[in-house]
Image (tube, rainbow, N blue to C red):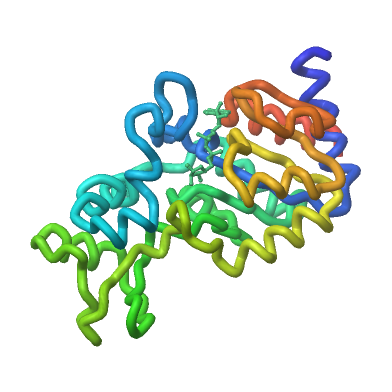
Amino acid sequence: MTYDEQIRRAAEAILDSGSVAVLTGAGISTESGIPDFRSPGTGLWEKMDPMEALSARVLFNNPRKFYHTGFKILTSMGNAEPNRAHFVLADMEKEGLIDAVITQNIDNLHQKAGSKNILEVHGDTRTGYCLKCGVKVEIGEMAEKVEQGEIPPVCDACGGVLRPSVILFGDMLPPCFDKAWGYAADCDLLLVVGSSLNVGPVNNLAAVCKRLIIINIGDTPFDSRAELIIRGKAGQVMDDLYKAIERIR
Ligand code: APR
């Protein structure tokens, strides 16, 4: 099947579906300058052990290590801008073509692009909270405390330890994951954009959906379930997909 035929088929599948959910991963943000985790040669996890960088175990047992490595990854994405793929998803939501963006990303780029119904199943890098009293704080406030050598950063309200809201390896997923599961199980079509689908339990969304289309450069363990796999760069593919939808509808 040619690329153009793949794009047409994907556009028809979206238009034929009463409900479409989208699952995005780090691959949608590499064209915004944020490295993903597992791309050969450039993925973050080729340079460091994820369990040492972004695990709850290190956060609690070795906060100095956490705040000097993993925390810096979390606070390094603030200047990135959305790329064409993020903007297309925001336009598709506005036009009622998709119902929700379920994202594993913590880079805020779907928000910046204008998407509204976003389920951040791996948490966010905008906030942190106190483990003792639960009060929410801006991540910038935590970064300032860390800069001043306050490690782990403590809560001004009660003196408890603060932690980032992002989901670390070993954490439970946030409540929005249940909603994401509902979207994946109930929608007519799940579109995966830029994820290796290596990490559970989020990758199971690709197992419970009725129809699956994958837009991803690398292969994934769920490729055999997909009715269509488009191996291309998310920005270009999403742009071509959007244009094909406009032509057909
Ligand atoms: N266009 C399309 N695909 C791309 C692009 C691009 N421009 N750039 C990279 N990719 C693909 C890669 O080939 C890879 O298969 O995106 C995928 C990204 O996979 P990962 O790096 O594993 O990222 P992700 O799937 O989001 O990881 C899930 O793992 O480490 C944890 O919590 C972290 O949320 C993350 C989770």
- Count of marks placed on residues: 0
Instruction: Using the image as rendered, state which of residue 87 and residue 150 is in the foreground.
Output: 150
Specify the farthest residue to the right: 16
Does 11 sit left or right of 235 as displayed?
A: right
Is 173 on the left-hand or right-hand side of 70?
right
On screen, residue 121 versus residue 155, left or right, reads: right
Where is residue 152 drawn, in percent x and y? Answer: 20, 65
Q: What's the residue at 26%, 47% (across, down)?
A: 72
In the rendered view of the protein, which quadrant contains the C terminus? top right
Where is residue 216? Give x, y as percent: 63, 28
- Position of the N terminus, as image quadrant, is top right
Which residue shows up at 55% across the image and 61% down it?
173
Q: Would you place residue 168 above or below residue 29 in this image?
A: below
6 versus 114 height, above or below: above
Q: Nearer the viewer, residue 224 or 135?
A: 224
Dividing the picture into quadrants, the one containing residue 44 is: top left
x and y percentages locating residue 219 in the rendered image: 65, 24
Compared with 26, 124 (above or below) is below
Residue placed at 60% from the left, 69% from the top?
Answer: 175
Q: Position of residue 108 (x, y in %)?
A: 45, 53
Name which quarter of the figure residue 135 lies in: bottom left
In the visual, does 52 lie left or right of 237? left
Residue ID at (73%, 34%): 222
Q: Nearer the viewer, residue 80 or 231?
A: 231
Residue at the far top: name it.
2
